[in-house]
Amino acid sequence: MEFAGIRLKNSLFVAPMAGVTDRPFRQLCKKMGAGLAVSEMVTSNAQLYGSTKTQRRANHAGEVDPISVQIAGADPLMMAAAARFNVERGAQIIDINMGCPAKKVCNVAAGSALLRDEALVARILCAVVAAIPDVPVTLKFRTGWDRNTRNASRIAHIAEESGIRLIAIHGRTRCDQYMGEAEYDTIADVKSRVGIPVIANGDIDSPQKARAVLRYTGADGVMIGRAAQGRPWIFREIEHFLQTGKELPPPEVGEIHRVCREHLADLYDFYGEASGVGVARKHIAWYTKGLVGSAVFRSNMYLLPSVSAQCDAVDQFFDELAARGNRLQYQMLDRMSDQPEALAA
């Protein structure tokens, strides 16, 4: 896939998720087949640029191109400054967040709350595009504020007119949060009305679902969020299925163990041991969810205080699984019905 002069190896995107799509996770998903991984959102508040969280989110050292950074805010001038700030620090694509439904974001009229003010949407988009004329700007948003005010087609038209080069649409309204099922009629309607690439997002959790959504909407690509948590190989599975029509076999126990341990090592290195142990817990839980004995393992793992203890526990868990057989039918125990442990923007 190619847009705005940037060539991607495929049309599979990693959704920006607060607390999840840090540099280690983005790198892993790219390694596993994703064409583009968008960072967790970075604030447009310049007073927070020096904070540890913002500095870490703006850290792209060694990251595989292209580097896409999502910014969030409600003030056009601040958003323009945030775009320049992140481009100066290595961003090759700036993504604008108008999809996050979190109260702490919407309460300050940012994220999906912006969908209620189309004039402000236009001012923000024009300001950011003008601030970084040589860098493509993309936009992620929802179908509307609620089901009675779905205005995605108007937002998409504003985006195209403002110079946005690609849009990603989550098939829910802000008021839907992550409840119910995503709908794709709105995405199909948007795709029929604009000339820029459209990426479909929401409840895409298998190769078959990815193909069905692409066919139904006519979208140019798909964006995967929660389904990639603990299952980053979903990108190679989807890519293979779209290319061949055949399913890849599920990963072997040994590979899941190796991928998990390498991911943990990157997390410990990125966050340091004290913070890394806490961040690692949710990823370990995702990697093991649905596997035999995982419920007891997770309840014990949450109590482990150190890197060495976590790693020893992970090794023991997967060694015991491997003793039952190398090939593992990875069980998806209704992952998508759970309350999300991270906020997909």
Image (spheres, helix red, strand yellow):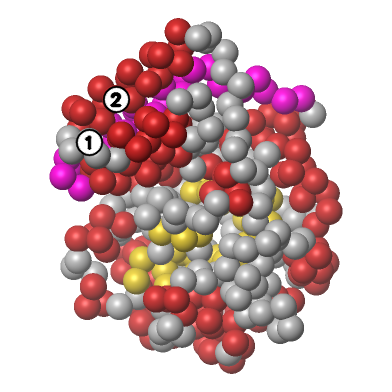
Residue picked out by circle 1: 304
Could you tell which of marks 2 and 1 lies nearer the N-terminus?
1
Pointer 2 local density, CA inside 10 Å: few below 14, some 14–19, many at least 20: some
Mainly helix, strand or loop, the magenta region? helix
From what the image shows, is residue 10 above or below residue 17?
above
Q: Observer-nearest residue: 223 or 276? A: 276
Residue picked out by circle 2: 313
The stretch in magenta equals 246-275
Pointer 1 local density, CA inside 10 Å: few below 14, some 14–19, many at least 20: some
Q: Residue 103, position in %: x, y? A: 44, 76
Q: Is residue 258 left or right of residue 241?
A: left
Which SS class for mark 1?
loop
Q: Is residue 66 left or right of residue 244?
A: left
| Whether residue 132 is visible | no
The residue under the point 28% across, 52% down is: 59
Q: Residue 162, position in %: x, y? A: 60, 79
From what the image shows, is residue 104 above or below residue 295?
below
Q: In which quarter of the image is residue 146?
A: bottom right
Q: Residue 239, position in %: x, y? A: 66, 34
Numbered label attached to residue 267: none
